[in-house]
Amino acid sequence: MKGNEAIAHAAIRYGADGYFGYPITPQSEVLETLAELKPWETTGMVVLQAESEVAAINMVYGGAATGKAVMTSSSSPGVSLKQEGISYLAASELPALIVNVMRGGPGLGTIQPSQADYFQATKGGGHGDYHLIVLSPATVQEMTDFVALGFDLSFKYRTPAMILADGIVGQMMEKVVLPPQRPRRTEAEIREQCPWAVTGRGSRAHGNVVTSLELDSAKMEENNLRFQQTYRTIEENEVRFQEYFTDDAEYLIVAFGSVARICLKAIEEARAKGVKIGLLRPITLWPFPKAEVRRLAEQVKGILTVELNAGQMIEDVRLAAGEAAPVAHFGRMGGIVPNPGEVLEALKENFSVNI
């Protein structure tokens, strides 16, 4: 199935309570598949096409405030419209899952694949000092698996999580193993697991109030300090990545999503010619695997980041590598996807690698 279709199947099987979205290429199959599967008849999951992206994210905000497992999906311009609501979710310490299947921009741009929302996702695209947990799938299987992982991490830390997929992963078809069906949580289980949730019971004085507004500056600073402590805990415990051929690597490629697969093919071709190149694939774009980049930077002669953008992840790689190794960037934009030969040519141009 397609990556987008896998998202829909995984959400139902996770026992999600609700999906609120709006169609936009190249992720419309998420909503279309949910509409076809009709989970409201089987698990009771609500599926609603909102009147706009802004409406959809605020429906997520309302559902999350009650402790429900709710989600939305969109593509780059649509996620831009959702940013205010995402920052509200972060400030209100609410769990929610957001799926962004990236297309080229800025503006309406193209419907072709891109990775140019890296800044938007990892730097907190809305206003204020906040982070999202950002998971980057490279396969349709990971599109499936990251739904449960994203929800679980989001509830664990009471902060929104995002699956940041490029349009290639959303549209390509692969075999996938779907997880078993989980039952949706009962109201009693939600109250036990989410004591902060709004239940509709009790007065304002005695019931929970969910809000991102705080007019007392001292209390707002206290809130922000609490958020930052949560983010430090996430950075200490939830960094995920994969390494390929790094034990003896003399040069390192850092790439995420579908581009990492292209780079892996380039590395296999280079190693067949005796050139030792390794690959680091960040799975969590936030928290970013800074320590691993630093460790490998001290081992190699140079690092190349390969991205479907003008150079965004390279900033995090450079910060992590410091002066240990030179860092260069190769990227394509406008929906053009590089081939392995172009990646090897970029290594030649930047580091005079004899391939």
Image (tube, rainbow, N blue to C red):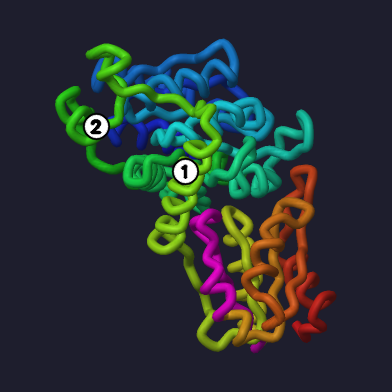
Say which residue label 2 marks: 195
Q: At 45% across and 45% down in the image, what residue appears?
A: 143
Instruction: Looking at this view, name the residue that lies furthest to the right.
Output: 349
Q: Nearer the viewer, mark 2 or mark 1?
A: 1
Q: Which mark is residue 222?
A: 1
- Tell me the amino acid under the disc marked 1: Glu
Q: With respect to residue 89, does 131 lie above or below? A: below
Q: Is residue 329 left or right of residue 237?
A: right
Q: Is residue 304 left or right of residue 1?
A: right
Q: Report which quarter residue 129 is drawn in.
A: top right
Q: At 54% across and 60% down in the image, what residue appears?
A: 288
Q: Report which quarter residue 23 is drawn in.
A: top right
Q: Nearer the viewer, residue 103 or 29?
A: 103
Q: Earlier in the sequence, mark 2 or mark 1?
A: 2
Quarter of the figure with the N terminus: top left
Q: Please state the horizontal and vertical placement of residue 74, each as a whole percent of the image.
A: 57, 30
Magenta stretch holds residue 259: no
Count of marks, rendered view: 2
Q: Secondary structure at mark 2?
A: loop
Residue 143 in view: yes
- Tell me the amino acid under the disc marked 2: Pro
Q: Please state the horizontal and vertical placement of residue 116, each as a whole percent of the image.
A: 70, 46
Quarter of the figure with the C terminus: bottom right
Per the rendered image, the range of residues in magenta is: 274-295
Magenta stretch holds residue 291: yes
Q: Which mark is residue 143?
A: none
Q: Please state the horizontal and vertical placement of residue 146, each as a whole percent of the image.
A: 41, 46
Q: With respect to residue 273, does 284 lie above or below? A: above
Q: Mark 2, residues whose alpha carbon is within 10 Å: few (<14), some, or many (≥20)?
A: few
Q: Report which quarter residue 350 is drawn in.
A: bottom right
Q: Secondary structure at mark 1?
A: helix
Marks 2 and 1, how far apart in space? 21 Å
